[in-house]
Amino acid sequence: MDNNGFSTTGNHPEALAQLKLNNGIELRYQSCHTAVSPQGFVFEGHVPAKFVRQFLANVPDQALGLSVPGMPVGSPGMEVGDKFMPYQVLLLKKDGNHEVFAQVDSAADQR
């Protein structure tokens, strides 16, 4: 994210799972990394910077943030040669529901 114009700081809390839950990220949406924006929006997992920018430029009503559950091969930070597994970026809503924010079918879709 730092290489894509975002300023980040690292934090390794002992109770990471609880931090995620406290921020509304249910187990089914969790991954390995969690970011919380200064505005309080969450970005869970390997969400491409492109979609973070789109989200922040036009925040949907009742949005909690974005998530890429799991660790899809080929997503940012999960590159393995030329292997790629299509995945979805989910829009998390404050009521606990979600919808698809973006469908990522190729590495080029992430840029």
Image (cartoon, rainbow, N blue to C red):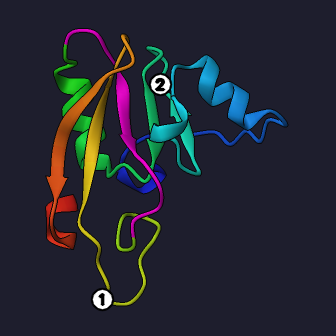
- Where is mark 2, residue-wise? 37
Q: In terms of sequence position, does the residue under pointer 1 or pointer 2 come before the other?
A: 2
Mark nearer the viewer, 1 or 2: 1
Q: Amino acid at mark 2?
A: Ser
Residue 67 magenta-drawn?
yes
Closest to the observer: 48 or 101? 101
Q: Quadrant of residue 29?
A: top left
**Circle 2: element type:** loop
**Circle 1: element type:** loop
Q: Residue at x 27, y 26 (%)?
A: 56
Badge 1 crowding class, 10 Å Cα cut-off, few under 14, some 14 to 19, many 20 or more, is: few
Location of residue 35 in the rendering, given as x and y in whole percent from the top left corner: 53, 35
Q: Residue at x 36, y 11 (%)?
A: 95
Location of residue 52 in the rendering, given as x and y in whole percent from the top left corner: 30, 38
Location of residue 42 in the rendering, given as x and y in whole percent from the top left corner: 46, 27
Badge 2 crowding class, 10 Å Cα cut-off, few under 14, some 14 to 19, many 20 or more, is: few
- Where is mark 1, residue-wise? 82
Left or right of 80 on screen, residue 90? left
Instruction: Look at the image and tell me in which quarter the C terminus lies.
Output: bottom left
**As drawn, which residue projects farthest toward the right?**
14
The correct choice, above or below, for 32 with respect to 73 in the image is above
Q: Which residues are magenta?
A: 61-72
Location of residue 54 in the rendering, given as x and y in whole percent from the top left corner: 19, 35
How many numbered dots are placed on residues in this image? 2
Closest to the observer: 2 or 67? 67
Residue 92 - label: none
Q: Residue at x 46, y 66 (%)?
A: 77
Residue 9 magenta-drawn?
no
Q: Residue at x 39, y 73 (%)?
A: 73
- How far apart in space, not on screen, are marks 1 and 2 (Cα)? 31 Å
Q: Amino acid at mark 1?
A: Asp
